Image (cartoon, grey):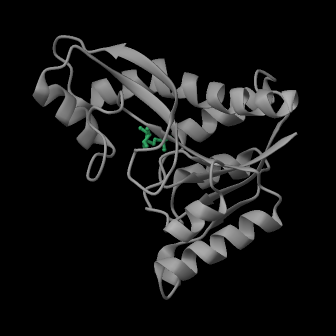
Amino acid sequence: MLNIAVLVSGGGTNLQAIIDSVENQTLKDVTIKCVISNKSDAYALERARKHGIASSCISPKDYGSKEEYGKYLAEYLKEQGVELVVLAGFLVVLPPEFIREFSGRIINIHPSLIPSFCGDGFYGLKVHEAALARGVKVTGATVHYVDEGTDTGPIILQKAVEVEEGDTPEILQKRVMEQAEWVILPKAIEMIAEDRRKI
Ligand code: GRF
């Protein structure tokens, strides 16, 4: 069994894709131990509650420093027996101490084909606005391991999505989520759980 935590900040559709995959058994041997949001009003927390998953708001605002926050978060996740941290639309930059503590055990979903439209400032709709402004014909999503840079860690999975005539950032964001993000995030977790089974 692979124990995971999902860290969120918003609507939680990627979290929902993981929950659905666990419940319908396409994602086997995975337990969602907890869902953590930095925002108390994130709808993702509600999704977790509806499925009986422990959920809480742990915000950097309540800690004296980023370091303290990272330390608390790491301790909390270790107490829960979390082995893999999944960032699913989590908008807090995690401190290096936390990343070192969970080295090789943090993954993130990014809504573009890295190395395009990624790094500092590229999040949410901004990613899709930039893709449309550049006029790319294909975009997509990437699941990667998290290191101390922004979107710089080793790539696990990518999936391409076509840009269509008349796309707005909102329309493109929705297509990237439906066709790529909700597919490759559960798939990447499955691959990691599968590798563990082999070990
Ligand atoms: C997704 O587009 C994800 O790629 C990005 O933030 C968004 C989160 O959406 N990092 P949701 O909260 O999973 O609906």
Identify the residue at horizontal 51%, vertical 48% (top origin). 146
Q: Which one is nearer the viewer's eye here, 46 or 6?
A: 6
> Which residue sits at x=52%, y=84%?
63
Q: Relative to the observer, which residue lies in front, 124 or 120?
A: 120
Image coords of residue 108 (percent x, y): 52, 43
Looking at the image, how many numbered discs can be counted on the residues?
Answer: 0
Side (left or right) of 12 relative to 20: left
Q: Quadrant of the C terminus?
A: top right
77 shown above or below 196: below
x and y, in percent, of residue 137 in the image: 21, 13
The reply, left or right, for residue 165 in relation to residue 195 is left
Q: Residue furthest bottom?
A: 64
Q: In the image, what residue occupies the spot 38% across and 27% down?
A: 174
Say if 18 sits above or below 73 in the image: above
Q: Quadrant of ligand 1?
A: top left
Q: Position of residue 139 (x, y in %)?
A: 31, 21
Q: Is residue 144 above or below residue 60?
A: above
User: Image quadrant of residue 136?
Assistant: top left
In this view, the residue in front, 186 or 197, is 197
Image quarter where the N terminus lies is top right
Q: In the picture, residue 187 is in which quadrant?
A: top right
